[in-house]
């Protein structure tokens, strides 16, 4: 007998017996009342039990991932086996065998045990094949759920995750797959279909083919910022690591400690490729990225595949998609990207959240209502330091009834200032610029213009307070109003010049998706970009297989 056993409450024992008994129905006439009573007696047992009697105890037991769902499935199926057809069993096993192409892991779906039991069906005992029946069902339920919703729950990992979770009825999916005789079709129906997910799968395949391990890995220690022209003992290690990564083509001089022009050019090329500020400064972020190995990058692909399993399957026919760490906004219509804009996003302290919504309206000549975090952390402390802070910033104060408040009458050391609204009027210094695009949401996040347009020339642009600043925001707003003939260029120019706050509803249905992925595919080239919120490693620690 093969060496398996499984610790379980008596529910599994009952399930095991019921399927075994049901399998015997095919070999003899329908059971009489005595056998029915025996089944009822088995299912009425409540004390904990084990089924290890059926298997030797020298091999670690597999655990069912979803005991209640498996039990419920068989109850609804009158405890009849469903994996009698060879094609169904092999179809599921092939998917498990190749699941690493999706960034998931063979061992998470009873892979080893299924392989062994499937290879010896003719010599397995009835008990062992009943055990196989249960494991196949459990594996399908888990695999379909992981493909549809992800292996992990993002809301358990990130405070900034607001996108609704996908849902799946894995039991109904299995019933459909069995009735149609097509496991592959069922699993394909729940896989992500977005082009980015497919590009990540291509990148994973290419990466594995080229090899995950590096022959040698040079680690650069942390230390003070190294500026161009300065000398530092770590320069030799920087040169070695750049050479390993293919950015430095010169011979590495072990005696050189000067950060010279050739090394600066290599660092800038690396910074450009990884979405870092292209300044040749060797600070902590650049060194962190230089120290990432091919295996680290492989893990980075895996965590981004997991993220895409969390995202909505239907993004809409017409949508705006923002990749937060790539500082990029794209407009997609009927599957085609029709325009792109550079963006600025929230800092590490004031992260831009991940969520989905729908464009509601556009505001020209907007006022800027100070968000709660800025009010608490900047404005009120600013007034406590300097009585002229509000005047210098052009801010006005309003009470809960909308009445203007004289700042000189406020006790800024009390808690009262937290109850006020702080607003900046339209004008050249307004940080929202001349337009904002609103999609009402719990985070009070929106797209907007900015007077500091030169900041878009920087490569690293995590500089906002959470909202998304958009390069050429006026053009994006005009596009969103392009189906309304009365808002032509002349009319919009008139509105802007008036200086009056003007709100215009958007009549097109345009979704907005704030997503986060740190691996991109450009012209069949995989590019790794800086994980600006340091989310990848935390996710990998949870995603990786145990042991």
Image (cartoon, helix red, strand yellow):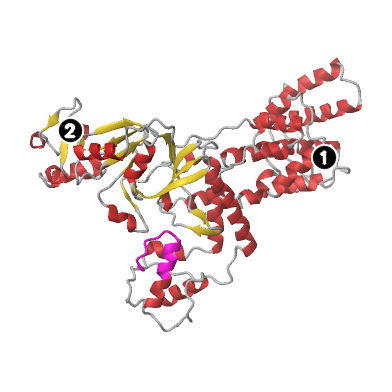
> How many residues crowd around disc 1 within 10 Å: few (fewer than 14), some, or many (20 or more)?
few
> How many residues crowd around disc 2 within 10 Å: few (fewer than 14), some, or many (20 or more)?
few
What residue do we see at 38% from left, 37% from top?
A: 482
Report which residue position mark 1 lands on: 86
Compared with 96, 238 (above or below) is below
Which quadrant of the structure image shows residue 264? bottom left
Say if mark 1 contacts mark 2, CB within 8 Å: no
- Residue 279 highlighted magenta (yes or no): yes
Which quadrant of the structure image shows residue 415? top left
Quadrant assignment for the N terminus: top right
The stretch in magenta equals 267-281
Nearer to me, 381 or 266: 266
What residue do we see at 82% from left, 18% from top?
A: 36
Compared with 456, 110 (above or below) is above
Q: Secondary structure at mark 1?
A: helix
Q: Residue 51 in the image: state x and y as whole percent.
A: 75, 35
Which is closer to the viewer, label 1 or label 2?
1
Q: Secondary structure at mark 2?
A: helix
Report which residue position mark 2 lands on: 416
- The answer to whether 406 appears left or right of 243 in the picture is left
Q: Residue 234 in the image: state x and y as whole percent.
A: 40, 74
What residue do we see at 29% from left, 35% from top?
A: 363
Image label count: 2
- The answer to whether 43 appears left or right of 317 in the picture is right
Q: In the displayed image of the protein, which residue is found farthest to the left?
A: 408
- Residue 517 highlighted magenta (yes or no): no
Compared with 188, 261 (above or below) is below
Q: Is residue 461 visible?
A: yes
């Amino acid at each position: 007998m093969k060496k398996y056993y499984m610790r379980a409450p008596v529910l599994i024992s009952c399930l095991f017996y019921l399927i075994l008994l049901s399998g015997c129905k095919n070999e003899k006439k329908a059971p009489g009342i005595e056998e029915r009573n025996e089944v009822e007696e088995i299912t009425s047992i409540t004390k904990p039990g084990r089924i290890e009697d059926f298997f030797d105890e020298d091999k670690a037991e597999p655990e069912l991932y979803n005991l209640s769902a498996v039990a419920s499935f068989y109850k609804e199926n009158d405890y009849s086996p469903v994996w009698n057809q060879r094609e169904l069993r092999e179809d599921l096993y092939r998917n498990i065998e190749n699941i690493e192409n999706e960034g998931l892991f063979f061992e998470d779906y009873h892979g080893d045990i299924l392989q062994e039991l499937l290879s010896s069906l003719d010599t397995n005992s009835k008990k062992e094949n009943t055990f196989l029946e249960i494991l196949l069902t459990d594996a399908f339920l888990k695999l379909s759920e992981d493909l549809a919703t992800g292996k992990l729950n993002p809301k358990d990992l990130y405070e900034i995750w607001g996108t609704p979770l996908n849902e799946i009825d894995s039991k109904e999916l299995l019933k459909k797959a069995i009735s149609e005789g097509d496991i592959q079709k069922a699993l394909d129906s729940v896989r992500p279909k977005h082009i980015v997910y497919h590009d990540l799968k291509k990148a994973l395949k290419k990466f594995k083919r080229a090899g995950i391990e590096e022959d040698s890995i040079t680690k650069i220690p942390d230390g003070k910022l190294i500026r161009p022209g300065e000398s530092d003992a770590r320069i030799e290690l920087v040169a070695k690591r750049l050479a390993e990564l293919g950015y430095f083509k010169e011979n590495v001089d072990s005696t050189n400690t000067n950060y010279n022009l050739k090394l600066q050019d290599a660092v800038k090329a690396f910074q450009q490729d990884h979405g870092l500020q292209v300044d040749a400064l060797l600070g902590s972020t650049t060194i962190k990225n230089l120290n990432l190995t091919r295996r680290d990058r492989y893990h980075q692909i895996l965590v981004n595949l997991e993220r895409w399993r969390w995202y909505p399957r239907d993004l809409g026919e017409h949508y705006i998609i923002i990749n937060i760490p790539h500082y990029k906004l794209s407009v997609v219509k009927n599957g085609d990207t029709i325009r792109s804009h550079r963006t600025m996003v929230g800092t590490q302290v004031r992260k831009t959240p991940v969520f989905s919504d729908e464009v509601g309206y556009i505001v020209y000549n907007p006022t800027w209502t100070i968000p709660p975090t800025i009010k608490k952390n900047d404005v009120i402390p600013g007034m406590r330091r300097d009585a002229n802070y509000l005047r210098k910033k052009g801010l006005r104060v309003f009470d809960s009834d909308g009445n203007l408040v004289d700042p000189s009458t406020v006790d800024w050391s009390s808690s009262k200032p937290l109850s006020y609204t702080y607003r900046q009027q339209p004008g050249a210094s307004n940080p929202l610029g001349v337009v904002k695009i609103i999609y009402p949401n719990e985070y009070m996040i929106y797209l907007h213009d900015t007077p500091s347009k030169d900041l878009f020339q920087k490569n690293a642009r995590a500089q906002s307070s959470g909202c998304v600043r958009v390069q050429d925001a006026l053009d994006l707003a005009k596009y969103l109003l392009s189906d309304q003939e009365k808002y032509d260029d002349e009319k919009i120019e008139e509105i802007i010049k008036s200086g009056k706050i003007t709100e215009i509803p958007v009549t097109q249905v345009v979704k907005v998706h704030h997503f986060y992925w740190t691996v991109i595919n450009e012209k069949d080239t995989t590019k790794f970009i800086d994980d600006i919120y340091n989310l990848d490693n935390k996710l990998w620690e949870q995603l990786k297989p145990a042991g």
